[in-house]
Image (cartoon, rainbow, N blue to C red):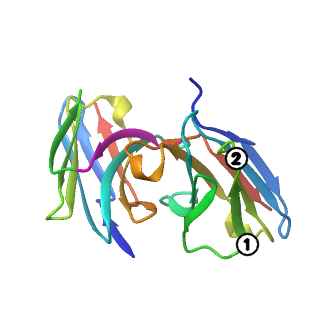
Amino acid sequence: GQNIDQPTEMTATEGAIVQINCTYQTSGFNGLFWYQQHAGEAPTFLSYNVLDGLEEKGRFSSFLSRSKGYSYLLLKELQMKDSASYLCAVRHDYKLSFGAGTTVTVRA
Amino acid sequence: EAGVTQSPTHLIKTRGQQATLRCSPISGHTSVYWYQQALGLGLQFLLWYDEGEERNRGNFPPRFSGRQFPNYSSELNVNALELEDSALYLCASSLGVSRLTEAFFGQGTRLTVV
């Protein structure tokens, strides 16, 4: 089985930084994904980590520590359009399992 | 390049009927995944196909089934529909299992069972 946990909700101010944590307990870990999902839309791929460390892509960065079963997604210079649900997903065995998602609300 | 396409966009069925949902992966992708997302809930893994074979399935009853065709497109079939099957059904595709570094989603099929 698998257990993927992330906070339910986070609120931040436009221009600020928000860090969304994800912890996981899975068998056969083979990589961790982050997706963004706006209400009523399909998830959009943001990042993929398979080795420990930080991956940076513009305003978004993702970090992985395999020994701790831990990842975070860092959103910098928040914009109103970043208000969405952020999904952590773990590839393990022949599955890609998702956490329940973190709803981020950006306020002016 | 076309992304993952799903059809139909919306589907309304009555309880007890069967539904067939279709997914065309990105060109060159051989893996297709199906997920169910009920309103306000997370993505629940349904099925994973790669190279025409079912690699894994989630904790869903047997009335949820599917297949992958030689051109890597896929169908999800739901038999004996129940009201709680109403959800957004999402398909994603990627390169083969051993090369899974990105997985892209289609826009989904919204199934409503009345």
Percent position (x, y) of residue B27?
58, 33
- Which residue is at a point 52% across and 63% down the rendered structure image? B44
Percent position (x, y) of residue B73?
67, 45
| Amino acid type assigned to the residue bearing label 2 in the image | Pro
Percent position (x, y) of residue A31?
31, 54
Q: Left of B89 or right of it: where is B20? A: right
Label 1 sits on residue: B63
Q: Left of B40 or right of it: where is A5? A: left
Pick whichever of labels 2 and 1 is earlier in the sequence. Answer: 1
| Amino acid type assigned to the residue bearing label 1 in the image | Arg
Q: Nearer the viewer, residue B17 or B47?
A: B47
Percent position (x, y) of residue A97?
42, 61
Residue B29 included in the magenta stretch of the image: no
Q: Residues within 10 Å of mark 1 (few under 14, many from 20)?
A: few
The label shown at residue B70 is 2
Q: Chain of mark 2?
A: B
Magenta stretch, main secondary structure class: strand
- Which residue is at a point 56% across and 23% down the rendered structure image? B1
Residue stretch in magenta: A42-50
**Mark 1: secondary structure:** loop
Q: Left of B100 or right of it: where is B73? A: right
Q: Quadrant of the C terminus of chain A?
A: top left
Q: Quadrant of the N terminus of chain A?
A: bottom left
Mark 2 in CB contact with mark 1 (< 8 angstroms): no
- Which residue is at a point 33% across and 65% down the rendered structure image? A4
